[in-house]
Amino acid sequence: MPEKLNNESIILTLAIIAAILYNSWPLGYVLDPNALHNSYVSSLEVTGKPYAWLFIFADILSGIAAVIIGFSIKKIKPQLRVSFIGYVAFGLATILEAVIPIASHCEESISACGISPRQILSPHDIASIVAAFSIFAILLSCKHQTRSNKIYKWVSITYWAWCITGLGLIVSVATDDLTTLAQALFLLACGLGLVIVPISLTKSKTIV
């Protein structure tokens, strides 16, 4: 039992690190403030930006941590198959979107980037969508697994926060209004989603 508790603590630590690294974009206001002027936070990783390497590295590390979390969960809780797949898919997609940056014209503004099929179907955008919905899968699975215990309330709050902020992001992109704020709220919800399963593992021993 102590070894299992220690493993769960390690998973929680990795999840917190992954969530923080995935939300490293606020550093952009200090390191490259012009990049966050009415544009996607991914513009911080555009080739040629002064600190692109730092934000790319942060996303890659976040992705690696998520993959490790997924396999660790599979090892100690093999019944949490959806969570395992969700973390691994999120990790791989996050690494991919970091390695293949968003188009350079997107750093100008949301409207310059556009929401055309060509843009949405770009490798970077597809990877971003997969990463986002992997968090949704993690939350949905955890919501089901914790339905009968006290951690359920917090899982449910995080689940609905993801849904609401995700819808808000879609609306903001479509209207080209308050997009940076909408992204900030959605990425925060995603970060919380990353840590919810490890919290449920450590705080709720009745998880099935």
Image (cartoon, helix red, strand yellow):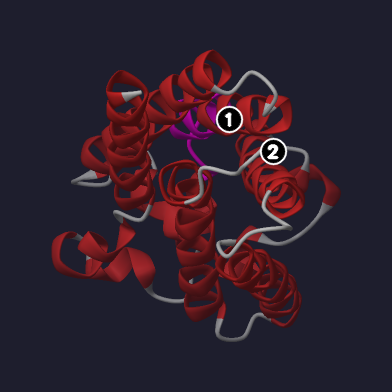
The residue shown at (84%, 48%) is 117
Give the magenta part as a residue range. 92-103
Q: Is residue 170 left or right of residue 153?
A: right
The residue shown at (73%, 57%) is 147
The residue shown at (59%, 44%) is 206
Q: Is residue 170 left or right of residue 183?
A: right
**Quarter of the image where one finds residue 124:** top right
Residue 88 drawn above or below residue 114:
above
The residue to which callout 1 is attached is 93
Contact between labelled residues 2 and 1, with CB atoms less than 8 Å apart: yes
Residue 130, which numbered label? 2
Residue 76 drawn above or below residue 10:
above
Viewer-nearest residue: 92 or 177:
92
* Image coords of residue 166 (percent x, y): 68, 67
* Image coords of residue 108 (percent x, y): 47, 64
The three-letter code of the residue at mark 2 reads Val
The three-letter code of the residue at mark 1 reads Ala
Quarter of the image with the C terminus is top right
Nearer-N-terminus badge (1/2)? 1
**Quarter of the image where one finds residue 164:** bottom right
Viewer-nearest residue: 49 or 70:
70
